[in-house]
Amino acid sequence: MATETTDAIIRATGRSLCEHGYADLTMQRIAAESSVTTAAIHYHFDTKEELLNAFLDDLIDRFERDVVVEASDPPTQLTAVLDAVFAADPDDEFPVALMELKAQAPYHETYRQRFVDLDERLRSVIETAVDDGIEAGHFEASDPAAVARFVTTAINGGHVRTVALGESPADTRRVVEGYLETELGWRPEATA
């Protein structure tokens, strides 16, 4: 259970990752981004690695809370997932911080496994919504696993384009919606 202090440290870690990047991230820079001293950070987290693991846990928890929504029908569920994934908040450190940690995944098994788990969870939510939607007659017949794989791949590619190229998440959303219309005969705006 996070305390106010650990929550402040985690938020400062996100801001520091965005400003300095992974390679230049230090406990001193995190302290400078918060109202917490370096000693207090070390009291809560023994190492930078432990702090980054907590930060990644927080990012993934926030992401899962946004994409795993209860909906009365599959089209609403799928629209809610797209709304959560493609929400553009210019003040949110999530996209840049997530990219910084994704770049470390080949070198840190813990990070890699968390991203594998996150990808599997997102694919599962999308696949279930598509499968249920086909079964209920909302969507045309298709391979739910293939649809989920395409959508998650587009989401990941869109994330890179947003962070690295400054492209709007709405651009990727339009691509995903066009694919869903072609593949399932449905566009998310139809449920709005």
Image: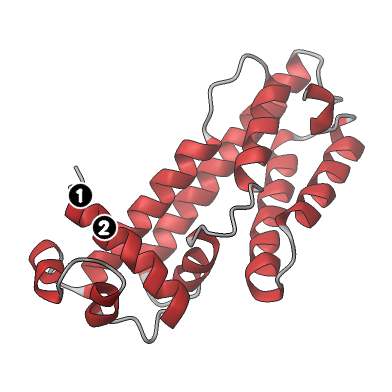
Badge number at residue 95: none
Query: Which residue is drawn at the image coordinates 74% and 16% (left, top)?
Result: 135
Residue matched to label 2: 8
Query: Which residue is drawn at the image coordinates 51% and 38% (left, top)?
Result: 66
Amino acid bearing label 1: Glu
Residue matched to label 1: 4
| x, y percent for residue 163 | 63, 69
**Residues at discs 2 and 1 in contact (Cβ within 8 Å):** yes
Q: How is the image coloured?
A: secondary structure
SS label for mark 2: helix
| x, y percent for residue 155 | 67, 54
Residue 162, picture quadrant: bottom right
| x, y percent for residue 2 | 21, 46
Question: Distance from label 2 to label 1 (Cα)?
Answer: 6 Å
State how many labels appear.
2
Query: Which residue is drawn at the image coordinates 88% and 44% (left, top)?
Result: 178
The quadrant of the rendering that contains the C terminus is top right
Query: Badge 1: few (under 14), some or many (20 or more) residues near its Cα, within 10 Å?
Result: few
Which sits in the foreground, 65 or 145? 65
Q: Is residue 86 left or right of residue 167?
A: left
Residue 78, picture quadrant: top right
Residue 135 seen: yes
Q: Is residue 90 left or right of residue 16?
A: right
Amino acid bearing label 2: Ala
Work out whether 58 lies above or below 82. below
| x, y percent for residue 174 | 83, 48
